[in-house]
Amino acid sequence: MSEPTIYIISAPSGCGKGTLISKLNERYKIYNSISCTTRRPRSGEMNGVDYYFITPETYNRMVEEDGFFEHAGFDRNAYGTPRKPIEDALNDGMDVLLEIEPNGAFQVKEKKPDSVMIFILPPSLESLERRLRRRAEQSGESEDQIQSRIKTAIPDIKRAYEYDYVMVNGDLDKAVSDLYDIVTKAKNGGEGLEAFTKDSMKKTIDEVLENA
Ligand code: 5GP
């Protein structure tokens, strides 16, 4: 049996990675890390399910006590992966999935170089903005927050050039099958994943960033 692997998935918010990951979960048994964040819950989000919603004081205490596997500030809020559940899952032989932004992703890669980094691109910046606006209608996010998300998305997408694998979330069925392929093949040497390497995907990343 191969060693338990950490899969790190990054994507700009509004890219639809939540849906993709829940579809992956239907096909692949993996421990899904639940992050801590100091941001306020959006409508429909549940404490202990989507995130642990914590105060800045609790966050700072966890940083001091080395309670995070990685942590980073993002878009005016703080986020972190609680350390113990990850270490327990790996010790139990389970693969682990972290859905985190690039600064945290590279912290994990440095600590655990065998981790597999996957970046999910939107088909275009215009489609990302449309999704963010749709979500804001449901969640009550302000225009200011939408603009801030769009602004953060561009430097995030530029980091895609450094990820092990890059894929596009356009057609959902195709994206689910691509993500499944990456997750199942990457830990066995990556054979069959040539189309998703950062070198193969360079032109696609360039195209997404064309009007940035
Ligand atoms: P959102 O506020 O839209 O849920 O997430 C904003 C960003 O924070 C996303 O890119 C998401 O992947 C990232 N994020 C969520 N949890 C964590 C975490 O524990 N650590 C880090 N570094 N980023 C996280």
Image (spheres, rainbow, N blue to C red):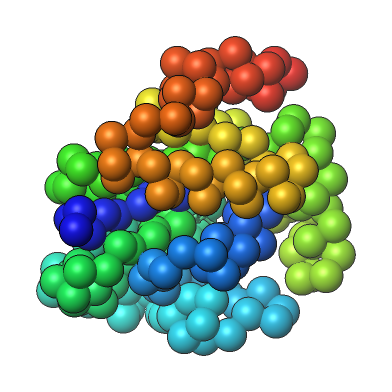
**Residue 37 versus residue 81: which sits nearer the camera?**
81
165 in relation to 63, above or below: above
- Residue 12's quadrant in the figure? top right
Q: Residue 88 at what x, y percent from top left?
A: 18, 76
Q: Residue 92 at what x, y percent from top left?
A: 18, 75
Q: Residue furthest front?
A: 1
Q: Residue 186 at what x, y percent from top left?
A: 35, 40
* Residue in the picture at 75% in, 64% down: 141
Q: Residue 176 at what x, y percent from top left?
A: 62, 51
* Residue in the picture at 67% in, 74% down: 42
Q: Quadrant of the N terminus?
A: bottom left
* Residue in the picture at 63% in, 20% down: 204
124 in relation to 147, above or below: above
The answer to whether residue 160 shows anywhere in this view is no
**Residue 44 versus residue 5: which sits nearer the camera?**
5
Q: Is residue 74 left or right of residue 95?
A: right
Q: Quadrant of the C terminus?
A: top right
**Residue 114 versus residue 122: which sits nearer the camera?**
114
Q: Is residue 129 left or right of residue 199?
A: right
Q: Is residue 20 left or right of residue 197?
A: right
- Residue 117's quadrant in the figure? top left
How many numbered marks does the figure carry? 0
- Residue 208's quadrant in the figure? top right
* Residue in the picture at 39% in, 42% down: 185
108 in relation to 134, above or below: above
The answer to whether residue 187 shows anywhere in this view is yes
